């Protein structure tokens, strides 16, 4: 408890380690009544937290620990789990479908996330300008984020990209006789990527907020020095919004790794054709709930957690190179 | 201050105790509602199917509740694959529905896990009537002396054809035609009518089972696979050639129209499926559809057997007598037959078979087809599938499709199939 009992005056201005606002009013205990925090208040505090604590223990922590145990066992839901050591993991690396699922997911993350963020940033920059009807456009571009993850949107997507549907017909008008994307193992993944890119509204709103924070003086000064649009973008906008960009990259990457619903529905529950949309979670689900290999599925889940953790760690490390936080700014 | 704390804690404990007791009371209340001997008993019935089946089942349930006012039936349904995912999870959690729709593929799987109720004792007590079944169907789901299900209908594999295309091509399928005749027909249809002759038989496990049986083997033995790479490799190699030659429909197109049927959507002149499925073709497509005999290797033996949907009880049910009463009603009541029609196959009991006189063309065709194969004397007994058969069937279908799409070579496909089959047999 003592570590938050810092009186506001104790924070030296410009002290690099302390985060402004951490010791603001209303955050810590009342400045004078430090002795009032007895066991009673602690108990009340824990009591108020108890629904959350119980939920966390029984619905998150407990099952997680259990699934960690299961990942070293063979478990078909009915018979008691049988310890098999690391065999689930060695089986996984030898399994061509598991490798396919890693390939599909990596491709989805590597293509989908950058394209989605680029689209979000581009539209955010357009919408940051003061124009008539601006709030309407913001809402319109944000709307797909609200409905994009839904089952119905995925069903519509399946219809759009089938043979003789609008995408196929547009292709024909443009001179490509490629056919619908849904039945084509090479193309269906791009239909999924298009579905996630279409939902660029959420990162767009965050970019918009970031863009509004960029001081106009910087642009004015740059213009005085004769900087063009490109220069202003790469030397002012991008560095100034890099913390926001970092946040979006992190969030969207983690989110992309977890893709399930859209792949499952667009492929009509088969994650096909020819395993072309067999994303990692789809294969995990199939192994666990269709093939009754819960041990294998748990092992897959833990490996995904570790992989996402590693990617996150790498992103955080890379921050130093490209993310600029304003020193001492408010 | 500390005394106050103590008070608070005691009060709190009291409160917690009270609320726990409250929960206990509610639970007890629920228990007595369904378990008492006097009040009505509720059983849960789940099945797979679509909306039209749901409406029919609901009607039957209404009828049952009227005749047995002390039994209430709660219903639930999903599509086939989703049904088994849900049931598997419910059964593992010890809370499966009391009565489920079932099929031969799942008998050994769930028997090995003690999920299914042995209905034998209920038949002895008189709660379940096993009289009046056609062609010995009452023994259909008897495994190791246990009665694990009661058939509601029977069906068999058939070749559903687009009659208009066959007529234009000048082909009349006849009992006793061979695979060579059929392949010649495919070529004629392709050349003359510019349409694939079949939707792609390479992934249909039940058809491949018939081909194997025609050659003295079978897809499954009681505890494993009844064939090997030597059989499957030539079969899939030839299948790929026929896809490339356009004799089988474009697999990419078939993929996109799912779950609709390729033949009904005009992608092929025919496809192999269960005869009772043909009811839906006239609703999905615009041509007229008929049932043709299964081609054979030697002109005689088709390897066919009666398949069947059945109703099973689950072992953890608290009301085995009511479960048996419900199953007995669903399989014998003539009114049920008039409601269900051939939705789950031709009714299994004579009473129900005679109660429903088909008036629509597809149902008449099914009745004629079932009679014709029974008369031809080609029917054989079915092998109960080993545990894991459902997973193996799914793998056969999926890998067959991958092969047709040109994603894997026949050799790799065969290897992948047997590797997955081995895993499935070990895991289940």
Image (tube, helix red, strand yellow):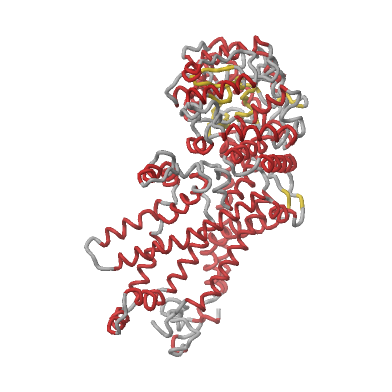
Quarter holding the N terminus of chain A is: bottom right
Residue A129 appears left or right of B85: left
Q: Quadrant of the C terminus of chain A?
A: bottom left
Q: Is residue A74 above or below residue B218?
A: below
Front-most of residues A95 and A229: A229
Looking at the image, can residue B64 be seen? no
Q: Is A207 or B214 nearer to us in this picture?
A: B214
- Looking at the picture, how far across and down is residue A106, in whole percent? 56, 58
Percent x, y of residue B404: 59, 38
Do we see residue A130 in this rendering? yes
**A138 on left or right of B244:** left
> Total number of numbered labels?
0
Depicted A177 relative to depicted B361: above or below: below
x%, y% of residue B166? 50, 18
Q: Position of residue A155 (x, y in %)?
A: 44, 43
State the residue in front, B161 or B171. B171
Q: From the viewer's side, name the closer residue of A255 and A169.
A: A169
Q: Using residue A31 as the reference point, say whether residue B81 is left or right of it.
A: right
Query: What's the residue at 77%, 53% (across, down)?
Result: A84
Considering every residue shown, the one lying at the far front of the view is B191
At a point 50% along the width and 12% down the height, the residue shown is B358
The picture quadrant where one finds residue B291 is top right
Q: Note whether A141 is above or below B294 in the view shown.
A: below
């Amino acid at each position: 408890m003592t570590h938050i009992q810092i009186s506001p005056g104790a924070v030296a201005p410009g002290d690099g380690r302390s985060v402004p606002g951490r010791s603001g009013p209303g955050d810590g205990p009342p400045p004078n009544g430090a002795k009032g925090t007895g066991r009673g208040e602690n108990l009340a505090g824990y009591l108020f937290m108890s629904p959350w604590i119980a939920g966390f223990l029984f619905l998150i922590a407990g099952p997680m620990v259990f699934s960690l145990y299961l990942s070293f066992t063979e478990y078909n839901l009915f018979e008691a789990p049988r310890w098999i050591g690391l065999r689930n993991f060695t089986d996984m690396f030898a399994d061509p479908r598991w490798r396919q699922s890693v390939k599909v997911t990596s491709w989805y993350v590597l293509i989908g996330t950058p394209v989605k963020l680029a689209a979000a940033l581009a539209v955010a920059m357009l919408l940051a300008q003061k124009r008539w009807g601006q709030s309407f456009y913001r809402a319109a571009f944000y709307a797909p984020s609200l409905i994009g993850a839904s089952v119905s949107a995925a069903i519509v997507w399946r219809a759009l990209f089938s043979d003789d549907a609008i995408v196929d017909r547009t292709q024909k008008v443009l001179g490509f006789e490629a056919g619908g994307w849904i039945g084509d193992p090479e193309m269906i993944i791009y239909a999924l990527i298009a579905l996630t890119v279409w939902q660029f509204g959420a990162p767009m709103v965050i970019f918009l907020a970031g863009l509004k924070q960029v001081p106009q003086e910087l642009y004015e000064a740059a213009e005085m020095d004769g900087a063009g649009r490109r220069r202003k973008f790469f030397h002012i906008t991008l560095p100034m919004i890099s913390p926001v960009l970092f946040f979006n990259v992190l969030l969207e990457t983690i989110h992309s790794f977890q893709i399930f619903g859209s792949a499952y529905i667009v492929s009509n529950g088969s994650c096909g054709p020819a395993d072309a949309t067999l994303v990692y979670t789809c294969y995990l689900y199939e192994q666990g709930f269709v093939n009754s290999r819960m041990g294998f599925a748990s092992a897959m889940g833990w490996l995904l957690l570790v992989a996402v953790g590693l990617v996150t760690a790498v992103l955080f490390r890379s921050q130093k190179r490209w993310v600029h936080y304003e020193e001492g700014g408010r | 201050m500390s005394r106050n704390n103590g008070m608070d804690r005691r009060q709190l404990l009291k409160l917690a105790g009270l609320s726990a007791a409250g929960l206990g009371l509610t639970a007890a209340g629920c228990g007595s509602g369904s378990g008492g001997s006097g009040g009505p008993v509720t059983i849960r019935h789940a099945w797979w199917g679509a909306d039209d089946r749901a409406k029919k089942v609901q009607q039957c349930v209404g009828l049952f509740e009227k005749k047995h006012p002390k039994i209430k039936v709660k219903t639930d349904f999903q599509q086939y694959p989703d049904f088994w995912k849900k049931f598997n999870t419910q059964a593992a959690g010890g809370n499966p529905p009391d009565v489920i729709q079932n099929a031969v593929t799942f008998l050994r799987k769930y028997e090995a896990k003690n999920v299914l109720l042995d209905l034998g004792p209920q038949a002895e007590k008189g709660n379940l009537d096993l009289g009046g079944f056609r062609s010995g169907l009452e023994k259909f789901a008897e495994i190791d002396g246990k009665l694990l299900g009661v058939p509601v209908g029977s069906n068999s594999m058939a070749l559903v054809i687009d009659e208009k295309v066959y007529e234009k091509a000048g082909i009349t399928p006849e009992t006793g035609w061979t695979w060579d005749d059929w392949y010649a027909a495919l070529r004629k249809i392709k050349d003359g009518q510019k349409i694939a002759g079949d939707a792609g038989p390479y992934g249909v496990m039940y058809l491949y089972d018939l081909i194997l049986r025609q050659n003295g083997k079978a897809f499954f033995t009681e505890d494993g696979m009844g064939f090997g790479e030597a059989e499957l490799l030539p079969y899939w190699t030839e299948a790929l050639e026929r896809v490339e030659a356009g004799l089988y429909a474009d697999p990419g197109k078939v993929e996109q129209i799912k779950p609709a049927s390729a033949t009904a959507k005009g992608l092929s002149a025919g496809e192999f499926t269960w005869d009772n499925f043909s009811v839906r073709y006239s609703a999905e497509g615009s041509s007229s559809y008929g049932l043709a005999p299964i081609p054979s290797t030697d002109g005689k033996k088709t390897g066919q057997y009666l398949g069947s949907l059945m109703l099973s009880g689950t072992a953890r049910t608290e009301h085995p007598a009511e479960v048996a009463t419900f199953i007995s009603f669903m399989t014998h009541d003539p009114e049920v037959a008039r409601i269900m029609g051939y939705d789950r196959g031709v009714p299994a009991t004579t009473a129900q078979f005679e109660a429903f006189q088909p008036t629509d063309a597809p149902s008449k065709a099914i009745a004629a087809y079932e009679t014709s194969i029974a008369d031809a004397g080609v029917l054989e007994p079915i092998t109960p599938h080993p545990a894991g058969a459902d997973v193996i069937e799914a793998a056969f279908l999926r890998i067959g499709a991958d092969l047709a799409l040109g994603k894997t070579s026949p050799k790799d496909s065969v290897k992948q199939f047997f590797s997955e089959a081995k895993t499935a047999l070990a895991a289940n």
